Amino acid sequence: MATVEPKALYKVDINTPQTTYFTVAINTSGFLDTETVNGGRVSPCVATDFATRPTTLAQSLLVSRGALRFKMMMESIGIRSNFQYHNIVTTYASDEGDSPITALEFGLVFDTPNFIPTTGTAIDGSSATTTRAGFIKDKIGEALNTTRTENMSVYDPTGTGNPQQLRTIAVTAGPVLTASIGEIVEAITVTEVTAFAPNTSNQLPTDNSLTYSAE
């Protein structure tokens, strides 16, 4: 048996970097949704994405914290390698801005997967990381267990004079749980889609993944 690559007609470049695809699923139903810095969602959606926008500024801030946490996750994931995210699916009880998100799913395509470490420890110290998927899960967990404050454009349903009722507010997003870090880890599932990557021998790089320690 032999594998023949279509290099002549379709210009397949065997030097093209091997990309790797991961799916991410986060069960957010157990995270806090109180009107505090720890409450709020984990979602790229903003107030104007909903059919019915948030009815109070406090509820709108929960939405904004969710968008900030999503940004924090993306920054944390990309610390070692460039990537693109795809196929984002958000699950809410209803299409209302006051409704909490119960699940977030998306895909990640990494340009240089061999830059992703395979060793480390989960944020709660419960398990050792042995795979790239484990590293990504760790970085997501870190983002959801930290605190950051940023100025954001927030929808204010009580505002006047601005057609979109937007205000610049310093938004603080804290850990999504305060009692059990382990439940944050348990809510995250990351899976490598091995069939997505090139599978001919001359397209598969040597595993040069880095040793990972908390950053």
Image (cartoon, helix red, strand yellow):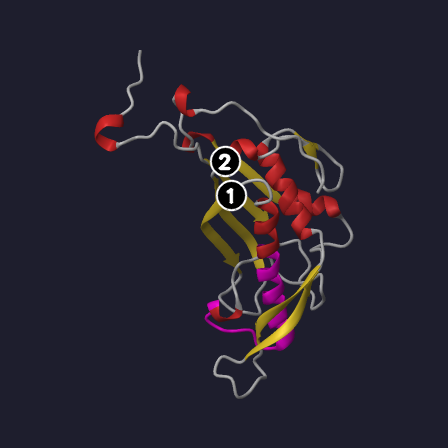
- Residue hosting label 2: 112
Q: Quadrant of residue 203?
A: top left
Image location of residue 99, percent across then percent down? 57, 66
* Tag 2: amino acid: Thr
Image location of residue 192, percent across then percent down? 51, 34
Query: Position of 162 compared to 168: left or right?
Result: left
Q: Is residue 41 above or below residue 82?
A: below
Q: Nearer the viewer, residue 40 or 111?
A: 111
**Mark 1 closeness class: few <14, some 14–19, many ≥20 residues within 10 Å:** few
Q: Is residue 13 magenta?
A: no
Query: Position of 127 compared to 188: left or right?
Result: right
What segment is highlighted magenta in the picture? Answer: 49-70
- Residue hosting label 1: 82
**Mark 2 closeness class: few <14, some 14–19, many ≥20 residues within 10 Å:** some
Q: Is residue 53 magenta?
A: yes
Quadrant assignment for the N terminus:
top left
Q: Secondary structure at mark 2?
A: loop
Q: Nearer the viewer, residue 72 or 137?
A: 72
Image location of residue 140, percent across then percent down? 62, 46
Q: Main secondary structure of the magenta part?
A: helix
The reply to whether discs 2 and 1 touch (Cβ–Cβ < 8 Å) is yes
